[in-house]
Image (cartoon, rainbow, N blue to C red):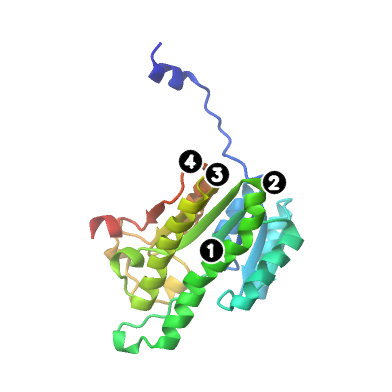
Amino acid sequence: MTVDRLEAAQPIDPQPKSLAGRVALVTGASRGMGREIALHFARHGADVAVNFLTRSREADEVVDVIVAMGRKAIAVQADISDPSAVEGLVATATAGVGPVDILVNNAGFGERRPDVADVDLALWNKTLATNLTAAFQLTQAVLPAMRAQQWGRIINISSTAAQTGGSVGPHYAASKAGIIGLTHGFATLLVKEGITVNAIAMAQIETDMLRQATAADPSRIPVGRFGQVDEIADVALLLATNAYMTGQTISVNGGMYYTS
């Protein structure tokens, strides 16, 4: 029997890989992609710390849904753009649901400025603090526990803007490009420790932010529609359960980057 036939003869496990016993911290998880990633991880067995900035009611609703699944969950308010808040976020999450095994750096800020002259230093600093510096700090904060158990997953949310420039402005594109560099840097240093670090570069995902964008137009997308939050959550689950993939940026953008 050939190798191909041997492989084909193996039974296929119909059950998806489980995150049972794992703890995930998802930033910006009160709505949109963060909410769906948090729920998706819980459906597959994870306990979840739900970070939010101002939407406490929505965050509590996410927690209620996760608890109803039989998982542990906690809502943790923190402004991740404030360096002094990051350690407290991780400490509270750890006390509430356990040491963080999976970190999803999802929370982001993107204020559209189509005229480059309108991108001032204050906007630049706020964008990089939220989208890039916070991801660095949070990763540093969860690494001791991951290193102690020789297992961890870091999932960074980037954007097609990192690869094309996008329409929000250079401040946003630079912050999301930095995420890809950050992903490569951490992945290289942690590859021997059972910790994977990957990024998702997405575009035109149907969230509240996209619906409020006057320039949003599905006809510009090669597949002809906006992406859905569950399509991002599916990729996040892949990265959380795959031990052989690290240092990668997965583009989920309906073909926008590939065809540009």
Q: Which residue is mark 2?
A: 21
The crowd level at tag 2 (other Cα within 10 Å; few <14, some 14-19, many 20+) is few
Q: Position of residue 135 (x, y in %)?
A: 52, 66
Of the pair 150 and 77, the residue shown nearer to us: 150
Q: Quadrant of the C terminus?
A: bottom left
Q: Is residue 149 visible?
A: yes
Q: Residue at x 30, y 61 (%)?
A: 221
Amino acid type at image mark 1: Asn
Q: Position of residue 148 (x, y in %)?
A: 67, 50
| Mark sitting earlier along the chain (1/2) | 2
Tag nearer the camera, 4 or 3: 4
Q: Quadrant of residue 7?
A: top left
Q: Circle 1 — which element? A: strand
| Mark sitting earlier along the chain (3/2) | 2
Real-space Cα separation, disc 3 to disc 2, in angstroms = 13 Å
Real-space Cα separation, disc 4 to disc 3, in angstroms = 9 Å
Q: Which residue is mark 3?
A: 241
- Compared to 142, does 109 lie above or below? below
Q: Circle 3 — which element? A: helix
Amino acid type at image mark 4: Tyr
Looking at the image, the residue that sits furthest to the right is 95
Does residue 85 appear to the left or right of 232 in the view shown? right
Q: Circle 2 — which element? A: loop
Tag nearer the camera, 1 or 4: 4
Real-space Cα separation, disc 1 to disc 2, in angstroms = 20 Å
Amino acid type at image mark 2: Gly
Q: Which mark is residue 105?
A: 1
Q: Quadrant of the N terminus?
A: top left
Q: Which residue is mark 4?
A: 244
Does residue 17 appear to the left or right of 108 in the view shown? right
